[in-house]
Image (cartoon, helix red, strand yellow):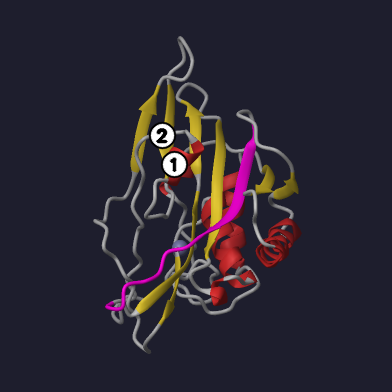
Amino acid sequence: MIALAGFGIYSQRSPLPATTQAAAQATLHDATVWTVSAALHTANSAATKLGLCTQQATEKSVVASSTTKPTATTPIETAVKHVTLSPHYTYSFETGTPASVRAAFAKAVAVYNQTGVVSLKPGTSNVFSNHITFGTYAKPTPDTSSTIELGEGGPSVVYSRLTHHGVNHAKAEFNTAYQLAVKESVALHEIGHALGLAHSSDRASVMYPMDQGRIALSPADIQTLKQIYAHA
Ligand SMILES: [Zn+2]
């Protein structure tokens, strides 16, 4: 999730408990036990939409503290830790996705492709390979909130407990209750979640939880991507 501050004070809406991980287990094939690990940053059950698991993780909130020195490391989503993922992804858009939304995601896709660490190409989803679905949802923010939610996204990984090889069927969406949400910086943030980047307290990172209009990944963001996809 990425938000926009309504006031000058850092204040992230955090109605959810600080659960760090949701790991649901499912037996998808006769004799093979797979583990499903999802960290969809969403209030809706996007995991159900993807048909992968019945549980969802909650948003991990990053609390900017004046006493804590901001870390220059972009953290990794729990769902992709200790899983071997291919750096190759296909992506597609939900039916009816507006052209402006497609254009914003396409720009962000190009930024990730430029890293040389991951590769995102248009294509259809299948159970054997990584895929990101782009789209929109509309969730107006309650008047009592000081921030508005601009988007959501996250990985949903199925992996073998034997080999630790996984497949990520992720998503990244704009909250079109706000037209200002449809922009490249928000797309970069939500794709970051989809690929396994978690929130960073470093303002140079696209994974800082408040939108700063950043359209370039920080060195720490790229470093963490390398960490996630190094073993493939
Ligand atoms: Zn976020």
Going by the numbered disc 2, the residue's amino acid type is: Cys
Residue 43, quarter of picture: bottom left
Q: Name the residue under label 2.
A: 53
Give coordinates of residue 213: x percent, y percent.
Answer: 58, 79
Q: SS of the residue at dot 1? A: helix
Lower position in the chain sequence, tag 1 or tag 2: 1
| Image x and y of residue 208, in percent | 47, 71
Q: Residue at horizontal 47%, vertical 34%? A: 51
- Asked if disc 1 and disc 2 are in contact, CB closer than 8 Å, the reply is yes
Is 212 in front, or is 202?
Answer: 212
Q: Which amino acid, by three-letter code, is at mark 1?
A: Ala
Residue shown at 26% from the left, 63% from the top = 15
Is residue 214 shown left or right of residue 110? left
Q: What residue did someone put label 1 on?
A: 47
- Quarter of image, ligand 1: bottom left
Which quadrant of the rendered structure holds the N terminus?
Answer: bottom left
Q: Magenta region: which residues?
A: 129-144
Seen from the viewer's position, the closer of residues 154 and 143 is 143
Across and down, in percent, residue 32 comes to: 46, 15
Q: What element carries label 2?
A: loop
**Please, is residue 137 above or below residue 49 in the view?**
below
| Residue 143 lies within the magenta run | yes
- Check mark 2 vs ligand 1: CB closer than 8 Å? yes or no: no
Direction left: furthest residue? 17
**For residue 27, above or below residue 75:** above
Q: Which of the labelled discs sits on residue 213, or is there none?
A: none
Say which residue appears at 42% left-offset and 55% top-offset: 41
